[in-house]
Image (cartoon, rainbow, N blue to C red):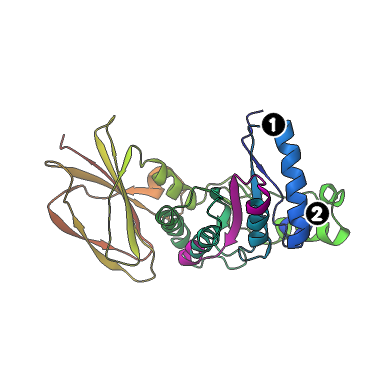
Amino acid sequence: SGIQYSEVGNEPDIGEDGGCPYRFTHESYCRYYEYTVAAALRADPQAKVGGPALAYFKSPILPALFELCASRQVPLHFVSWHIYNSDPAAIRATIDYVKALLGRYPKLKPETVLDEWNMALTTPPENARIQPCFVAEVAWQMKDAGLDLSCYYHIRDFHVDRDRFARFFSAKGASFMAAWWNRMPQYDGLFDYQNNVRPPYFAFKLLSRLTGDRLAADSSSPTAHAFLTYDQTYDLHSLLIWNFSAAPTKVKVINLHLPGRLVAHRRSLDAASASSDENARLRPLKDVALSAEMELDLASYAVEFWSIEKPR
């Protein structure tokens, strides 16, 4: 079928408020999970099964599921949960919590999947520069914490049809879904309702340019982090660096490992531009010749991308 992952449920701890027509206790979810994965694996023995796609990562459903799978050898190929929080450290804390809980069950080796994440749903960022920088910082925290997979929520804002939800929701639940998606301001989509691209899209575009092998890029600053890669095919180093802070900061860039004379072609992610044209969003900055040690001024929520190569 081409579908590898089968997730049992979606936010079963909050029911219709999470968009699905069921709400479970930890006991009932475990029964449901055991029967469902057995059926899924009969239909496709190669499927990866897991869950519970929690709205709240500390729900009692999670330890109960781990206990079930460890004690009864029920397959659990991945464990999943969601979080909407504007603090990247809070998102990191969910990963640390799930991994610590898994540590109590050494026989379980599931992938860790944070398959919905974004900023707080009801508190939009006041500064347009925050959300793209948030994307970069959360990606760094995820990698640093050892998360296996993640899914940003979501690609595009979308109006819903209340009548379609009413076929399998209560009247109250269907009205809640329609009111939330059709009348509440939405800030999560990489594309808005009119298909206009939003600034966080360009943070993902810059992340996608970090091709090749990841190299070490350490920072002594709690707010400034970076990704550094080398792509042998293009003989090109790429550096993505940002400052997730309301205050500007100075960063020392120390070139300890990059070979020979190199030049950085710099781009700044301009989230405040009135245009969504890529050349306006990814604004060219002055090239710099790399030295053994250099100081970089990063404005609040600044995101810079450097393509580093030999002088032409």
Give the quadrant of the N terminus. top right
Within the image, what quadrant is residue 300 found in? bottom left
Percent position of residue 312, x then y? 16, 34
What's the magenta region?
70-92
Label 1: which secondary element: loop
Instruction: Give the labeled residue for mark 1.
Output: 44
- Res. 274 in view: yes
Label 2: which secondary element: loop
* Mark-to-mark CA distance, 1 and 2: 25 Å
Percent position of residue 212, x then y? 33, 37
Residue 87 within the magenta-colored segment of the rendering: yes
Percent position of residue 52, x then y? 66, 53
- The residue located at (63%, 32%) in the rendering is 46
User: Does residue 282 sit above or below 67 in this rendering?
Assistant: above
Q: Indicate which disc residue 21 carries.
A: 2
Mark 2 burial class by Cα count in 10 Å: few <14, some 14-19, many 20+: some
